[in-house]
Image (cartoon, grey):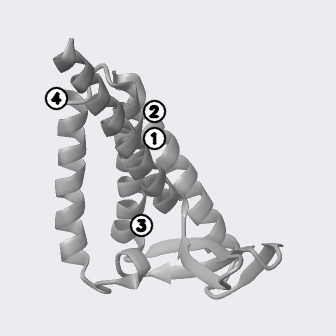
Amino acid sequence: MYKYYGIALFVIVIDQWSKWLIVKNMVVGERIMLWDPWFAILSHRNRGAAWGMLEGQMWLFTIITIAVIIAIIYFFHKEANNKPVLQVGLMLLLGGALGNFIDRLWRGEVVDFASVLIPGINYYFPIFNVADAALTFAVIILFIGMFIEERKTRKQVKA
């Protein structure tokens, strides 16, 4: 069961390494086009939550993040035992939460850098980072895991 913590650690390491590269090699606002016009590396800082909401509310983010981390670890050990899909999702969630939390504590802001243009509607998705991507994948995986567990429960009740 503890081997799954490696997933969280991997997310944190890749997230912090990628942010370090951005901070060390780019100035804020600098853009490097990788796949013109759909994908670029754009050095950006965020002092708020998703999409810059609640900017400057560090105390709130600290309380929420600590509560979320405790809840993730509790749920991982109490409810996700022998449920690998849920365990992977929870560890991605933990790694993403800790990755951005480290930024807030260390830098006072989160380093974002992935800029994606959504084709067809000409809309730039809000700039994000590895931790944000891990959080997004975690939610998707957790929904899948809950769906799988619900189906197992229904089959057991019918049997």
| Vertical placement of residue 50 versus 63, above or below | below
**Cα–Cα gap, marks 4 and 1:** 21 Å
Between label 4 and label 2, give the one nearer the viewer: 4
**Cα–Cα gap, marks 4 and 2:** 19 Å
Q: Nearer the viewer, residue 145 or 26?
A: 145
Q: For the N terminus, which image quadrant? A: top left
Give the residue number, with chain letter if any, for mark 4: 78
**Cα–Cα gap, marks 1 and 2:** 5 Å
Q: Are marks 1 and 2 in contact (CB under 8 Å)?
A: yes
Give the residue number, with chain letter if any, for mark 2: 6
Looking at the rendered structure, the kind of residue marked 3 is: Asp
| Left or right: where 126 falls relative to 67 | right
Q: Earlier in the sequence, mark 2 or mark 3?
A: 2
Looking at the rendered structure, the kind of residue marked 4 is: Lys
Between label 4 and label 1, give the one nearer the viewer: 4
Looking at the rendered structure, the kind of residue marked 1 is: Leu
> Under tag 1, what secondary structure?
helix
Rendering coords of residue 57 (x, y %): 24, 82
Q: Are marks 3 and 4 in contact (CB under 8 Å)?
A: no
Give the residue number, with chain letter if any, for mark 3: 103
Give the residue number, with chain letter if any, for mark 1: 9
Q: Earlier in the sequence, mark 4 or mark 1?
A: 1
